[in-house]
Amino acid sequence: MTNLIGLTQDQLYEVVRELGEAKFRGKQIYEWVYKHRAPSIDHMTNLPKDTREKLKEKHTIEHIKIEKILIDEKDETHKFLFSLNDQNTIEGVLMKYKYGYALCVSTQVGCKMGCTFCASTLEGVVRSLTSGEIIDQIMVVENHLQIRISNVVLMGSGEPLDNYDEVLKFIYNVNNSNGINIGQRHLTLSTCGIVPKIYDLAKENLQINLSISLHGSNDFIRSKMMPINKRYPLQQLMEACKFYIEKTGRRISFEYSMVNGVNDKIEHAKELEVLLKALNCHVNLIPVNEIKERDFIKSSKDNIIRFSRYLNDIGIPTTIRRELGSSINAACGQLRRNHTEKPKG
Ligand code: SF4
């Protein structure tokens, strides 16, 4: 059986062609799946009964399931644990902002990138998600809470550029105005810096936001925090970023987790100045998430403010990320880890 969730409009045109149906039926099915959220093929009431029967022979609608929801009472951040059809679990985080709801979605079960501050990678990667499993995180949250999500961030567990084809398919599909219709400028892809894939993405000429996990101001610190830096050191990464900005005309945002005594001194801000000064970019400072498996301690408020002031003063726009969901361990990987760690039986 093929799950209709995840198929693009073009793929549905192909499905109806094979069923011997007119092309417009493909668009109708697309709208039922993504816009009207039909729970089953039988709900597609503008399709003739025999078309539905033919479609049902090889197709189905099967959503991922919400296993658990944790809600931060203070800021209404919701953390979701989803189970996939093969019983693997992933996480998503819904954040409420003034402009609406943003959902942080996962792109892989686990992650192989080994960033030392991240709980998603502690057991490596299990598998990549299909584009359907990525898009369905949005649909099940919207259906469950009866809300409309305006922004999506590919920043949950997994490295999106390590699942390039499915992530691109997801971007085009979620952007389709006959379906979920989230504008490209409302999508953010966050990467640890897989340089060749940044070049590939630049050539797609999308208008999405690209966010780079930087976290280290020199190769020594960054390689310690992010093993990917040994493969693609900062100079190569910066060249790729420059190419991306020139090609797409978009500003890049750099995420920088502030770790006490590791990367939060003014000397590090000065190194960032050299790296980023010539780029059209923005820096987002994040007090590092403290996870029990690692001994990172977040920087003091004073250090973060001093760091931010330095960068702003020299002309690199810098903001400090608000910590949402702090009472529910909203950092990626933590809920799944607690879930899979539970003794079975
Ligand atoms: S921070 Fe992102 S890329 Fe790094 S290990 Fe975690 S999920 Fe993977």
Image (spheres, rainbow, N blue to C red):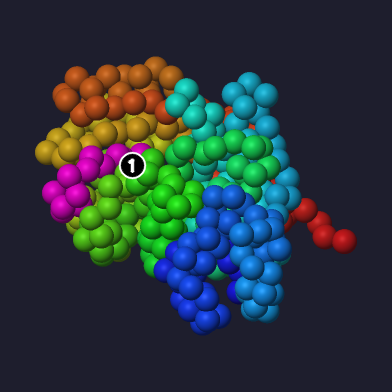
Callout 1: few (<14), some (14-19), or many (20+) C-alpha neighbours within 10 Å? some
Residue 218 quadrant: top left
Identity of the residue drawn at 51% across and 44% down: 104
Q: Quadrant of the C terminus?
A: bottom right
Identity of the residue drawn at 41% across and 53% down: 176
Q: Nearer the viewer, residue 227 or 327?
A: 327
Answer whether residue 317 is magenta in the image: no
**What range of the chain is rendered magenta?**
243-255
Answer whether residue 246 is magenta in the image: yes
Secondary element under disc 1, as helix, strand or loop, is helix
Identity of the residue drawn at 66% across and 37% down: 145
Residue 302 quadrant: top left
Identity of the residue drawn at 21% across and 29% down: 316
Where is residue 288? Give x, y as percent. 47, 35
In the shown orientation, is residue 155 left or right of residue 88? left
Where is residue 34? Give x, y as percent. 54, 54
Q: Quadrant of the N terminus?
A: bottom right
Residue 322 at least partly seen? no
